[in-house]
Structures are given as structure tokens and as C-alpha cells.
Image (cartoon, rainbow, N blue to C red):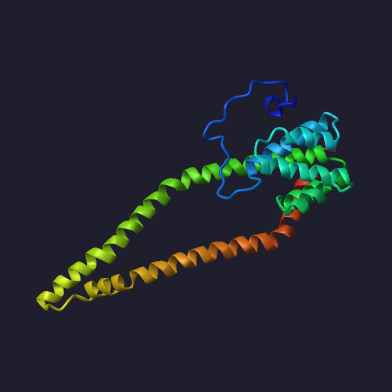
Amino acid sequence: MGIDLATYTKKGVSKTKKTSFLDRDVRFVSGFSDKKKERFYKELALLIQSGIDFKQALEIITEQYKSKTDRALITTIKQEVVQGKSLHEAMKQSKKFSAYEYFSVKIGEETRKLDKVLIELQKYFDRKIKMKRQLISVFTYPAFVLAVTFGVLYFMMNNVVPMFSSVFKQFGAELPPLTQKIINLSHNFSTLSGVFIFSVLAIIAFHHLSKKKNGIGILRLKWFYGFLSLEP
């Protein structure tokens, strides 16, 4: 029978509570998410501090995950460690962890402060999850209002403005310059909207790729200064 690490706290054992909606993981893509990583580092640090070896610790952690994909990931890491690889090498090879994570674990292994490093990683992901939830709560309403506004504007430009344009043409009256510009804009509004959306997506993709490519050095420097603050 497996050990339920979810019932353990720093001071002892507490009752397991049902997960509320706000406690659920917030993510947009499948994989080993931030919430799962936060739990992984917390449980591994607890087991290491208890004096359990890597193999048994990873076996216990594997039993805590219900997803077959997550269980397979932890099992693979365990097998790599049993075969002689270090934990950070197994994490790096899985391609489910960032450079910040496996470089941090590497420093922890080399300095024999792995339990403290794991606790710092758990705190890092805990802060990251809370910040992500705050950002989502802050931007949800403005994003909804912006989407509705854009939808109304799109409907006006593609349906209402052309209708008024045909009415004005029937009277044969010369249109004011501002009205003529609005009509000309409505004729190309679909194309302009597509270009704008494509540009925004391209900027986001470029930012993501640049951050992924150039962030390793920054993350290592950030961890170095953070590591100096650890107690000996």
C-alpha cells in the first residue's frame, strides 16, 4: 500500500481536503505542468529529508500520480537514476523540465544541498502558479470586454456601414471626407483584422522562442544569486 504524501505537512499529518476550482492547475497545453512540478519537488524534498534513497523515493512519488503519462515520466527518471545517471541528467533527458530546473538540481547535487534546492524550486513554482492565477483573474474581464468590442466593431464595419453606403449612393450626394474614410476602412476591415491578428500571434511566438533560446544564461545567473542566500 502506497504512502499518500498529500496528507503530510511540515509539522505532521493533516486531513486531505478536496481540491477546489481555484486550486486546480491552470494550464493551456498538456504535459508535466507547473502544478505537478510544484508537487513533485515538494514530495521529493520531503522524502530525501526523511532519509529515503532516490529509487524508493521516486517509486513512492510515482504512486501518487493518476495520469499514465505522469507515472511513465517519473518511472523513466527513476530508471535512468538506477542505471547510474544523476537526477539532473535524467530530468534533462526527459525534456519535460526547463534549464532553470535541471541546472538548479545539478548545483544541489554538486553541493549536497539537493533537499534545499528542491524546496526552493517548490516555492518558485508555488509563486509562479499564484501569479498566473492573479494575472488570469485580472485580465479575464478586460479581455472579455475587448473581445465583445471587437466583435461589435467587426459587425458594424462589415454589415452596417456598407448598408449606409448603399443608401448614400442612391441619393447621389457627396459624402463628407470622414464618412468616406470610414466606408473605405470597412471595405478592407476583414483584411486589416487578419493582418493585425497574425502580427500579434507572430510577436507572441517570436517572444516565446527568443525567451526559450536566450533564457538559459539569465536563469543560471538568477539561480546563482538565489543560491548564495541558502543557509549552509
Q: Which residue is drawn at 30% across and 57% down?
A: 152
> Which image quarter holds the C terminus?
top right
Q: Position of residue 88 (x, y in %)?
A: 81, 48
Q: What residue is shown at x 69% (from left), y 59% (from top)?
A: 215
Count the marks: 0
Q: In which quarter of the image is residue 120?
A: top right
- Counting from the top left corner in percent of width and height, residue 229 is at 78, 43
Q: In which quarter of the image is residue 8?
A: top right
Q: Where is residue 194 in the image (x, y as percent from the top left)?
A: 41, 67
Query: Going 82% across and 49% down the picture, which residue do you hit?
Result: 106
Q: Can you say whether 160 is above or below 39 in the image?
A: below
Picture layout, residue 81 above or below residue 185: above
Given residues 230 and 166, the one toward you in this image is: 166
Is 88 on the left or on the right of 20, as rendered?
A: right
Query: In the shown orientation, is residue 37 left or right of residue 145?
Result: right
Residue 12 visible in the displayed image: yes
Q: Does residue 71 sit above or below 185 in this rendering?
A: above
Q: In which quarter of the image is residue 64?
A: top right
**Residue 78, how many percent across, how many down?**
81, 42
Q: Residue at x 74, y 36 (%)?
A: 62
Q: Give the farthest residue toward the left.
A: 171
Image vertical order of residue 64 relative to residue 227, above or below: above
Residue 222: tell me if it is visible: no
- Which residue of the protein is positioned furthest toward the right in this rendering? 84
